[in-house]
Amino acid sequence: MRIKAVDLVDVLVYLIVLGTFAQLFPNIISESFLTSLVTAILLKLVLEVVVRVKKMIVGRIKGAETARAKAVSTVSLVVAAAGSKALILWLTDAILGDAVHLGGFFAVTLLVVTLMLARAGVRRVIR
């Protein structure tokens, strides 16, 4: 697996968004720049996996021939969406402990949406 320039840009964007959230929301805490950097890298890794899984599930929904298969795939998409936030919270706690607190489920959801929008915006500017 190779690190590409776009991956480094994503981590930089995630670091900026995470730092901004830590400044604006009192329930999001990152004790130092290094913990923010590790958190940004962790978010990058988790979100890359989640995006791939969601694309795969959406492909299954589009290719489903029966209503049952479509319903199961749709439920899978909802579970993956919610599970990704729980995974982020759990991994952050497991790896960084008390050094980083990303708030609760809704704060992480807002953070992830902002990260994805910022990432898409920066990628659009680069192109």
Image (tube, rainbow, N blue to C red):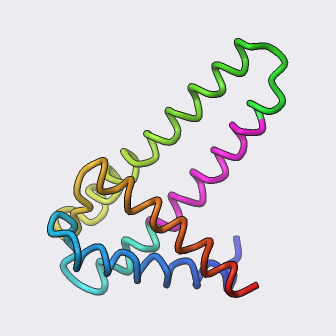
Is 115 drawn above or below residue 17 in the view shown?
Answer: above
| Observer-nearest of 58 and 53 | 58
Question: Magenta span: helix, strand or loop, mainly?
Answer: helix
At which x and y percent is residue 48?
Answer: 60, 60
Q: Residue at x 18, y 78 (%)?
A: 31
Which residue is nearer to you in this view: 6 or 98?
Answer: 6
Write down the quadrant of residue 7 in the picture: bottom right
Q: Note whether 112 is above or below 34 in the view shown.
A: above
Magenta stretch: give its range. Answer: 43-59
Q: Is residue 18 left or right of residue 12?
A: left
Between 42 and 15, the residue placed more toward the observer is 15
Name the residue at 49% across, 81% down: 13
Residue 4 picture quarter: bottom right
Q: Nearer the viewer, residue 108 or 99?
A: 108
Tell me residue 37's x, y (percent). Answer: 38, 80
Query: From the viewer's perspective, is 31 left or right of 120?
Result: left
Quarter of the image that includes the C terminus = bottom right
Asked which quadrant contains residue 101, the reply is bottom left
Residue 35's spot in the image, x, y percent?
A: 29, 78
Residue 54 on image: x %, y %: 64, 44
Q: Is 2 part of what is drawn in magenta?
A: no
Residue at image coords 52%, 38%: 80
